[in-house]
Image (cartoon, rainbow, N blue to C red):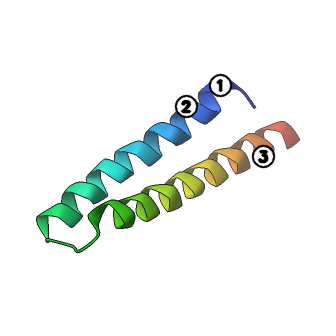
Amino acid sequence: MNRVFWVVSILVGVIAFLAALLVFLWIDSPSPYLGALVIGFLIFEISFYHRFQQSKEKRLQ
């Protein structure tokens, strides 16, 4: 796996974390950091899996 593969997935996760944190702070959530961390991690995992599948399909063709 190349470096761009990781950087894109991490960048998507960080952007999702920041967006979720702003939303949770805006709605006065009791634990905004924990909620934003969970959302950011889930979106990072989905992004990583999606990029992995694209890479795998490209190699098989």
On screen, residue 5 versus residue 14, left or right, reads right
Residue depicted at 20% across the width and 55% down the height: 22
Amino acid bearing label 3: Glu
Q: Where is mark 3, residue-wise?
A: 57
Residue depicted at 36% across the width and 44% down the height: 15
Residue 3, disc: 1
Is 19 situated above or below 4?
below
Q: Where is mark 2, residue-wise?
A: 7
Residue depicted at 63% across the width and 33% down the height: 5
Residue lying farthest to the right in this orientation: 60
Q: Residue 55: x, y in percent?
A: 73, 40
Amino acid bearing label 2: Val
Q: Of 1 and 33, which appears nearest the observer?
A: 33
Element carrying mark 1: helix
- Going from N to C along the chain, the mark reached first, 3 or 2, is 2
Residue lying farthest to the front in this orientation: 30
Please say whether residue 7 is visible from this viewpoint: yes
Q: CA distance from mark 3 to mark 1?
A: 19 Å
